Image (cartoon, grey):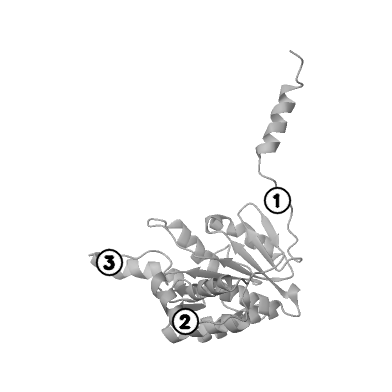
Amino acid sequence: MADQGDPLARIAAALERIAPAAHGAADWLAAPAYVWDGAGARAVARIEAPQLTLLRGIDAQKELVVGNVARLAAGHAAHDMLLWGARGMGKSALLRASVVAAQAGAAQRIALVQVAPEALSTLAGLFATLGACQRRFLVFIDDLGFEDGDASGPRALRSWLEGGVEARPANVRLAVTANRRAIVARHLAEQDDPINPRDAVDDRLALADRFGLSIGFHNCSQDDYLAIIAGYAEAHGLAFDEGDALEWAKRRGARSGRVAWHYVTELAGRAGRSL
């Protein structure tokens, strides 16, 4: 059999083919957003977000988030934010839209950095990198939750938010979305602990208390649901029937901004339109 070459060279070539591509060094001043996976950052050329005017039924929440992100972008004092509550009510969409608004006319002022929940253990390294940049960053963790028995994750996040030696730098603020205000799961059994049950509850709520802004999102009313649909429909030149829209929500078992958008997508499909 003919010589197939150096076996070590063939092994090295095979390993290069199966190994994940190495991350290049990110240019933290070039893109409007980045995705951090724990090993490195990937630049995102465009933030996908609805116009702020189309986010209806959350006016009070919108005012708080937009104002806080604008302050961060301007280099003023700003809060870490916890957006918690009902699913599909625009928590992550509002954060993205607020950053887009803050970038208007001065895109270099601020960038959004989305962190995968499984990459939380690498936040210290990310903060060290961002702290050396002449730019402000909103680090975004979407749909955060900790498993029962996970004590290290919540404690590390508390330390990063405030008081730890590796706390996030002055040009970085955290924004977290979660379905629960406490982020970590809570159980009725906490109330049955015979040894000071408040200790367990307070420890779990302490994480939420570290956020300067803790903003609740609640299930929308029928009027708000229809108003959300009306806003999207007007923006895309679509007509809709209120009875049909309510029937859509009934079949889905919920009224929310997400269900409203799904209905608008259905309207556009029926009309042979794209969105």
The disc, 1 or 3, on the residue closer to the chain's N-terminal end is 1
Mark 3–mark 2 distance (CA, rounded to whole Å): 33 Å
Judged left or right of residue 212, residue 53 is right
Three-letter amino acid code at the position of disc 1 = His
User: Where is 226 relative to 274, above or below?
Assistant: below
Three-letter amino acid code at the position of disc 3 = Leu
User: Where is 43 relative to 265, above or below?
Assistant: above
Dot 3 falls on a residue whose secondary structure is: helix
Judging by the rendered image, the residue that carries numbered circle 1 is 23
Estimate how packed mark 1 is, as few (under 14), some (14 to 19) or many (20 or more) residues with alpha carbons within 10 Å: few
Three-letter amino acid code at the position of disc 2 = Tyr
User: Where is 146 relative to 182, above or below?
Assistant: above
Q: Nearer the viewer, residue 248 or 153?
A: 248
The disc, 2 or 1, on the residue closer to the chain's N-terminal end is 1
Percent position of residue 5, x then y: 77, 21
**Quarter of the N terminus within the rendering:** top right
Judging by the rendered image, the residue that carries numbered circle 3 is 188
Percent position of residue 206, x then y: 42, 70
Q: Nearer the viewer, residue 191 or 36?
A: 36
Mark 1–mark 3 distance (CA, rounded to whole Å): 45 Å
At x 63%, y 57%, the residue is: 125
Kindly indicate the quadrant of the structure image that contains residue 221. bottom left
Tag of residue 225: 2
Farthest-out residue, top: 1
